[in-house]
Each structure stands twice: as C-alpha cells, then as structure tokens.
Image (tube, helix red, strand yellow):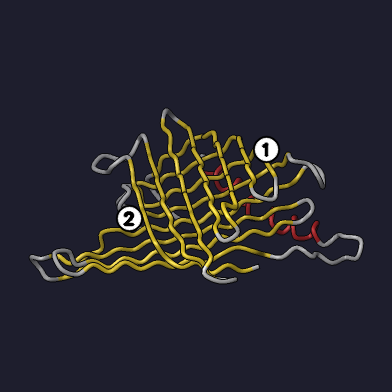
Amino acid sequence: MRSKYLAAMVLAAGLPAVAMAAETEGSDGVDKAKWSGDMALGFLFKRGNTNSDSLNASINATRDSAFWRHTFKADANNETEKNPDTDKYQRTAENYYASYKLDRKLGENSKNYLFNVGTYEKDNFSGYQYEASYAIGLGRRWIETDRQTLDLELGPGYRVQCLEPEDSYGNCGNSEESAIARVGLKYVLSVTENSDFRQEVTSEFGDGSAKTRSESVFDTKINSHFSLRLRYLLETDSNAPDGTDNTDQEFSVGLAYKFK
C-alpha cells in the first residue's frame, strides 16, 4: 500500500515539469502564460473576558495556458488563548493545508480536461498527525461566461492518514491508507464590478467514510490590488478519531493582495 502511495506522489511531482516543457513549445518558442492569484492575511485579537490572538494566511495562484492549467493553494491558521489559571498563552488551533492541481485540457477550446491533484494537511488538533491524498480524473467546465465559471470533477485516488502520537511531517509508523473517490466543484462569480465570490468544495469518499472541505470567499475591492476579504471554511470528517469533533469551522476577515 505504501509503495502505491509513494509512486502516485512521484508521478504528481513529475507532471509539472512535463507541463512546463509542453507549454514552451509554441510557434515562437515562448510561453506567454503568467501566474495570477492572491495572498491574504487576517488577524484577530481579543482582550477582556477572553484573551486570545489568532492569525490566518492564505495564497491562491493559477497559471492558465492553451492546454495546461496549474492551480496552487495553501493556507495556515494559528490561535493562542490565555489560560486564566496559569496566566500563560496556550495554542488552541494550529493547522496547515496545501494542494497542487494540474489540468490537461482536451483541446485548445475544449471544456473537458484531465486533472491530477495532490493535497497535504497538518492539523495538530484533528486527531491525525497529517493527512495526504492524490487523485486523478476527468473534469469539465460547465459554465464559462464573462461573469462566472463552474468546474466539476470526478476521479479515483488514494489517501494516507497518519495517526497520533507520531511526530512527523512525512514519516509515519501508524497510518490508515485507503482508496478514495474524489468529487470537486469550483464556482467563481463576478457579483459586481468591485466584488467577487468564490466557492470551492472537495469531497473524498473511501472505506465507509467521507471527508469534505468547503471554502467560501467574498472579496470587495479597495483599489486595483487590495480587497477586503470574508472567508468561511468548513471541514467535515464522518470518521473522525475518538475525542475529536466531526466538524471544524473557521470564519475570518482580512486583506487580500491580488497579483497578475
């Protein structure tokens, strides 16, 4: 089982290099596609009856060319709260998430594409030391207008969940490994000239369990580069380890810097 997982991750790591090489094979030998996306940062400080500090940061980047589309996501959340008995701050939340997805469009103007995606998540309060997955499959852009796009994806994959108390970001002597079916949705809407909405949902089904990550983002432009961002993240795990909740929710307000 472990060898299959490693082989899949090696394949995922090699595909971006193949895509980069293919993209530069244009008629003039130059790839004109550029990275675009945003970086966001949010803080929340509470003083009084509750003393706590929280910080969340995220990055979303996309590189879209005639036949290939790269999508990279990463976010982090940390929170500390003051213990009234010890008068010391203790960490109450700490999680990190990253994913890389590579799409191969089935024709320059085709709405269908093949995808492969790898994800990694480390949440020190989830009951798992880390979780990693890899999936391949078929996607289709069902809606594409000047105002909105809608992508739907479906494919098989593989998931590794490292159980505590192993203290590692990669190695694990006690893990749960299973085949999964991955379903993905991404919807982007230009609400007005100065505001945008994005909804991304991914679900992984395997071994009688279901794990879902849903991210909702609303941006309102302040100027050409900066936006005020409202973000809601919902994560559910139908088979969460004993002593942990099946649902995690995060709501944040912050600034986002857009680049292109």
The answer to whether residue 61 is left or right of residue 29 is left
Disc 2 secondary structure class: loop
In this view, the residue farthest toward the left is 85
- Callout 1 amino acid: Trp
Q: Report the residue marked by disc 2.
A: 124
- Callout 2 amino acid: Asn
The answer to whether residue 148 is left or right of residue 59 is right
Disc 1 secondary structure class: strand
Look at 72% across and 59% down and name the residue there: 17
Which of the numbered marks, if any, corresponds to residue 142?
1
Tally of numbered tags:
2
| Residue 245 occupies quadrant | top left
Query: Of label 1 and label 2, which has the lower sequence position?
Result: 2
Picture coordinates of residue 138, whole percent (x, y): 67, 37
The answer to whether residue 4 is left or right of residue 207 is right
| Residue 114 occupies quadrant | top right
The 10 Å Cα crowd at callout 1, few under 14, some 14 to 19, many 20 or more, is few
Picture coordinates of residue 212, whole percent (x, y): 44, 40
Marks 1/2 in contact by CB < 8 Å: the verdict is no
